[in-house]
Amino acid sequence: MIFGHARIPIMSWMRQQAAKSLMHATQAGEEVTTLGAKVSLGIGDLAGSHHDSVDDIMQELLSHERHGIELYSDLLNLSQGASVSLEEFARQKIRNEENACRRDREMLRRRGDA
């Protein structure tokens, strides 16, 4: 899906993002099992479509990170007063996703953007 002179660094960055997502899923699973619950093995909706540009891919990634913030915020609200561990887990993930959104917005900027 990525072509041109920037293919190598972009593909490397995307692989890093995929590895980070897998790590987050593993950490979430550990939190769930530590509480004595079971982790769903169901696969959620797979987002992905043909994009004409790297900017389109970046916009989709930004959208997913914003959705992640919403979900982690829901977890934070549900866990407040019930589990300090879950609260801290949710806060850290919210912080990580907010930083990722800032980074992605910066990557989408063009020279001269304010």
Image (spheres, rainbow, N blue to C red):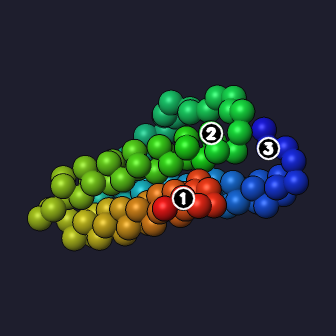
Horizontal and vertical percent position of residue 66: 41, 49
Horizontal and vertical percent position of residue 83: 20, 65
> How far is mark 3 from mark 2, CA to CA?
11 Å
Tag 2 and tag 1, C-beta contact below 8 Å: no
Instruction: Identify the residue at horizontal 71%, vertical 39% (top origin).
Output: 53
Q: Quadrant of the N terminus?
A: top right
Horizontal and vertical percent position of residue 2: 79, 43
Give the number of the disc on residue 12: none
- Identify the secondary structure beneath mark 1: loop
Q: In the image as oriented, which residue stretches furthest toward the front?
A: 112
Instruction: Identify the residue at horizontal 88%, vertical 54% (top origin).
Output: 5
Q: Which of the two labelled residues, at mark 2 and mark 1, occupies the earlier sequence position? A: 2
Q: Which of the two labelled residues, at mark 1 and mark 3, occupies the earlier sequence position? A: 3
Quarter occupied by residue 104: bottom right
Work out whether 18 lies above or below 80. Answer: above
- Identify the secondary structure beneath mark 2: helix
Mark 2, residue position = 56
Q: Nearer the viewer, residue 96 or 89?
A: 96
Q: In the image as oriented, which residue stretches furthest toward the left?
A: 81
Quarter occupied by residue 36: bottom left
Q: Nearer the viewer, residue 28 or 47?
A: 47
> How far is mark 2 from mark 1, CA to CA?
18 Å
- Tell me which amino acid carries mark 1: Asp
Mark 1, residue position = 113
